[in-house]
């Protein structure tokens, strides 16, 4: 355990929840609060793809992410927080350009 607490808990009567996580590596974390069931989050390896991703699929994904409108929006967001409506108005986007449905999804293979 990485962080020690000066307290104790028991799983007697309430049980304990074990929660696998790819985010807390390499240390497990136990969390408890009075009246709540204890939780132990433990590290697991990230799942790897069942098959290698082809270079063509990678190219399609990167092209979808590098769409010129998307890049302009990201540059605007890098300067400060904006709502979706503010971004669309600032960039003069039409309704079709605001939400190019499927451009990222279709490029994801």
Image (cartoon, rainbow, N blue to C red):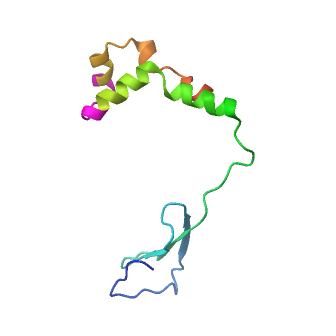
Instruction: Give left or right: position of 6 versus 69.
Output: left
Q: Nearer the viewer, residue 13 or 105?
A: 105
Residue 12 in picture, x, y percent from top left: 52, 87
Instruction: Give left or right: position of 78 versus 95.
Output: left
First to last magenta residue range: 78-86
Q: Nearer the viewer, residue 63 or 106?
A: 63
- In the rendered image, which quarter is residue 92 located in? top left
In magenta stretch: residue 101: no
Instruction: Give left or right: position of 84 versus 52.
Output: left
Q: Is residue 96 visible?
A: yes
Work out whether 14 lies above or below 78.
below
Q: Residue at x 40, y 25 (%)?
A: 71
Residue 101 in picture, x, y percent from top left: 53, 22
- In the rendered image, which quarter is residue 80 located in? top left
Q: Is residue 109 visible?
A: no
Q: Can you name the residue that lies furthest to the right here?
A: 51
- In the rendered image, which quarter is residue 77 located in? top left
């Amino acid at each position: 355990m990485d962080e020690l607490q000066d307290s104790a808990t028991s799983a007697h009567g309430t049980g304990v929840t074990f929660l696998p996580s790819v985010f807390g590596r390499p240390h497990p974390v136990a969390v408890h609060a009075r009246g709540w069931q204890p939780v132990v989050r433990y590290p697991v390896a990230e799942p790897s793809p069942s098959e290698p991703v082809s270079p063509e699929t990678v190219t399609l994904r990167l092209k979808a992410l590098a769409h010129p409108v998307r890049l302009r929006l990201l540059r605007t967001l890098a300067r400060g927080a904006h709502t979706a409506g503010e971004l669309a108005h600032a960039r003069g986007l039409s309704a079709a350009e605001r939400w190019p449905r499927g451009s990222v999804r279709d490029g994801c293979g």
